[in-house]
Image (spheres, rainbow, N blue to C red):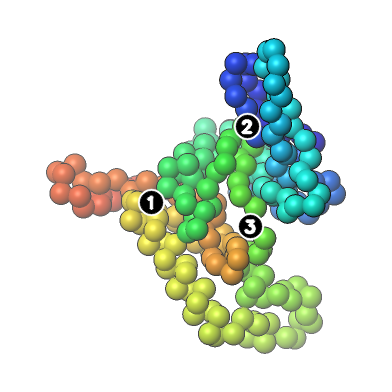
Amino acid sequence: VYLMRDAPPTVAVENAYRTIVPSKTVPIERCGQRWGEVVKAVRLTHIEITGAGTCRSFAEPDPHRPCCYVAIKKLRKRVFQPMIERGCPENPYSEISLMQAVADNEHVLGCIEALEDDKYLYIVMPYLDGGELFYAIHPNDGAQPAYVTQAERAALPEAQARIYFRQILECADFLHSRNVAHLDISPENIMLNNGRCILIDLGGARQVPVAADGDGKRALFHPSEVP
């Protein structure tokens, strides 16, 4: 499956993607409903063609060089849009806005670009190859006998846990310094990339308001409830 921005011939389009099939997809579920999934894709190489007119051409990456992988969050509009209208606190459109505004791909996962068609919203993100922090904590979760205790399941050494915990605090501080509250920090919403923790999933995050008196102090905002 190929994905590319639809634009007039006079508008430059630099990116195109091909999803990798077969590949592992990660389902996205909210409030008991399947919003969509995250798929792995490869960014195609843009080719400049000289001559009359404008021609967009893309080719597969050079097999002798490392591929540029991306992750694409593919969300079903018919599922998530009615929930947003009912007041669901998770909003993919505000997530895109926050990712583009504050993410640096070192503390918080950013957005390369966002695309949509009649059925889906696509959020294209850098690919993180380390997996969820959850599986670093419990690499054999679900594969061990029921009598094995939770403490015995934990395989992450304390020294490494301290490193990850410090990195998580740095990521949260990065967001807070930009007046953003994540509101859903969990091992499932933390990815590893080159051994470093990165916060993901800003769908439920909120921009923290600042007091109107101009003193720079943060103000409270009303809590959100899932419909």
Q: Which residue was labeled with disc 2? A: 14
N-terminal label among 3 and 1: 3
Is label 2 in a helix, a strand or a loop?
Answer: loop
Residue located at (59% from left, 69% from top): 195
Q: Amino acid at mark 3?
A: Leu
Quick one: 80 or 40, which is closer to the camera? 40
Residue 136: horizontal and vertical position, in percent? 64, 73
Q: Residues within 10 Å of mark 3 (few under 14, many from 20)?
A: some
Label 3 with label 1: CB-CB less than 8 Å: no
Disc number lying in front (3 or 2): 2
Q: Which residue was labeled with disc 3? A: 128
102 on left or right of 227: left
* Vertical order, 112 against 169 (above or below): above
Quick one: 167 or 190, which is closer to the camera? 167
N-terminal label among 3 and 2: 2
N-terminal label among 2 and 1: 2
Position of the N terminus by quadrant: top right
Q: Give the distance between the C-alpha atoms of the residues marked 3 and 2, in whole angstroms.
A: 22 Å
Q: Residues within 10 Å of mark 2 (few under 14, many from 20)?
A: some
Q: Give the distance between the C-alpha atoms of the residues marked 2 and 1, in whole angstroms.
A: 30 Å
